[in-house]
Amino acid sequence: MKQNIYDNETFYTLYDEMRNDDKKLSANDLIEIPTIRGMLPDLRGKRVLDLGCGYGDNCAYFAESGAKYVLGTDISEHMIGIAKSTHMNSNCKFQVLAMEDISSIPDKFDIVISSLAFHYVEDFDKLLKDIHKLLKENGLLIFSQEHPIGTGTILNDACNEEDCIDLGNKNYFLVSDYNVNGKRIVDWNNCKVVKYHRNFSCIINTLQRQNFKIEDILEPTPSDEVLAKKPRYKNQFDKPYFLFIKAKKL
Ligand SMILES: C[S@@+](CC[C@H](N)C(=O)[O-])C[C@H]1O[C@@H](n2cnc3c(N)ncnc32)[C@H](O)[C@@H]1O
């Protein structure tokens, strides 16, 4: 079942506020975006597909980095509407399309990228099978997702994700249900948001089963520069927010 929460006004009003904060201190700005961009190969002359492209900022970056064709797709009309109006002068193309339906794309790509969107898709095998077909020979898949150490935990009403206990001057975070893969419903931006938890072995084994060779896995920690701007992110040494994988089509 697909959920299109980014077209829900209650949700996107708060999400847009968080992402458009001009202090640029979100974990997206300080950690996720620099890490995924750092994993890119030389994009000159390449054809790139961005799945769950959101506002299209990465797409514009790929085009500025020399990609000859960039297609950004997203389930949300709201996000694609902003992508089109913000980047109308770039040579990127944007399309409302769910990741569950990408087999309808007629093109082939050198690189498929996705930032923080795969955990919204239930059938990871099918998603990877469809991506495999869209990639040219030796094509690359580069994606980030919420880290499985965080997506598994089922919290009751009295707890939230940032809760931790201090023992001997150190933070210990809550983890539960890590080895129970499947649907999670989390409270975010005053909405019930559906995500799918997959433990590490499920992610790795599904990539292998769908004929991808893993080239790189990152669980980034904040640099000193990031910590100076946002000291709270030191908690990522204990519990990373994001997982990044680069894999090649076999
Ligand atoms: C956390 S945002 C990330 C957006 C963008 N990639 C970025 O990094 O700024 C997740 C995006 O995934 C999109 N999304 C969620 N479920 C989707 C689905 N089933 N198919 C396509 N896009 C989806 C949302 O609409 C949203 O734009």
Image (cartoon, rainbow, N blue to C red):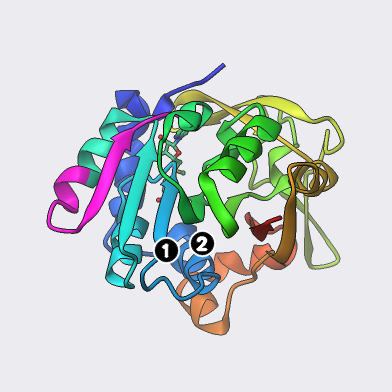
Where residue 247 appears, x then y in whole percent? 67, 59
- The answer to whether any part of residue 33 appears in the image is yes
Residue 108 to residue 169: above or below: above
Circles 2 and 1: CB distance less than 8 Å? yes
Query: What residue is rendered at 33% in x and 73% in y?
Result: 65
Rate crowding at label 2 as few (under 14), some (14 to 19) or many (20 or more) other CA atoms within 10 Å: many
Name the residue tied to disc 1.
Answer: 29
> What amino acid does circle 1 point to?
Asp
Q: Residue furthest top?
A: 1
**Residue at image coords 29%, 64%:** 63
Q: Give the left or right position of residue 185, taking residue 225 as reference.
A: right
Q: Is 228 placed above or below 57 here?
A: below
> For the magenta stretch, what is the residue range?
84-98
On the image, which quarter does residue 232 sit in?
Answer: bottom right
Whether residue 160 can be seen here: no
The residue wearing badge 2 is 32
Is residue 91 within the magenta segment? yes
> Callout 1 environment at 10 Å: few (<14), some (14 to 19), or many (20+)?
some
Number of on-image labels: 2
